[in-house]
Amino acid sequence: MMENKKFKFRTVQEYLDHLGVLERGTPEEIRHARRNFRAIYLKNYRKHYKRFHPTVSLSFKEQDKLLLSEHAQQNGMRLASFIQQLVLDYLNRGSIPCVPDPGMVEAKKLFLLCYDLVEELHFESNSQDLKVSYRRLLELFAKIENFLKPWS
């Protein structure tokens, strides 16, 4: 859980044992104690989290926000996470954004389809020539995969 000097209970069980409601409390008192633990825990957690995770606010024009939201959804991400990744990718890699080029996404899909077909052929055949070709293709695929990584 969380280490905080003001909140000494690491689990709800410790909290309930400390209060003694498990031995002498009614079911309603136990439910109430559980809710209290959760409220106290979350309050302390939020304080701790805010201290180490500062927030930044940005404002966008509506059409810009819609464009960002659309790209975030296409990448299966929430908007805030998408913007954070986009900015950090730009800063860490230069001008290469985290938004993949549609052509490269399609190339990667085709590459993976080829890889699956070659792997299927390899396991269906006992030919020594095919095994040598399979090893060569694996080497080629590894090179292509390394080339495609920045765009995935």
Image: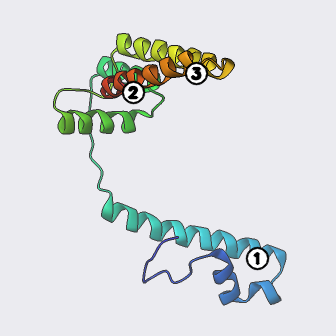
**Considering depth in this image, is 68 or 123 the residue closer to the camera?**
123
Residue at image coords 29%, 32%:
86
Cα separation, mark 2 vs mark 1, equals: 58 Å
Residue at image coords 29%, 20%:
64
Cα separation, mark 3 vs mark 1, equals: 58 Å
| Image position, residue 44 (x, y; %) | 46, 71
Task: In the rendered view, tell whether residue 32 sits above or below residue 80.
Answer: below
Residue corresponding to mark 1:
30
| Image position, residue 139 (x, y; %) | 40, 25
Marks 3 and 1: which is nearer the front?
A: 3
Task: In the rendered view, tell whether residue 23 sits above or below residue 89.
Answer: below
Q: Which amino acid does label 3 sit on?
A: Glu
Cα separation, mark 2 vs mark 3, equals: 14 Å
Quarter occupied by residue 36: bottom right
| Image position, residue 46 (x, y; %) | 43, 63
Marks 2 and 1: which is nearer the front?
A: 2
Secondary element under disc 2, as helix, strand or loop, is helix
Residue corresponding to mark 3:
119
Task: In the rendered view, tell whether residue 117 sits above or below residue 23.
Answer: above
Quick check: 94 left or right of 78?
left
Residue at image coords 26%, 46%:
56
**As drawn, which residue projects farthest toward the front?**
128
Mark number displayed over residue 142: 2
Count of numbered circles in the view? 3
Quick check: 73 left or right of 102?
right
Q: How crowded is mark 2: few (under 14 residues within 10 Å), some or many (20 or more)?
A: few
Q: Residues within 10 Å of mark 3 (few under 14, many from 20)?
A: some
Q: How crowded is mark 1: few (under 14 residues within 10 Å), some or many (20 or more)?
A: some
Question: Looking at the image, is mark 2 or mark 1 earlier in the sequence?
Answer: 1
Secondary element under disc 3, as helix, strand or loop, is helix
Quick check: 118 left or right of 65?
right
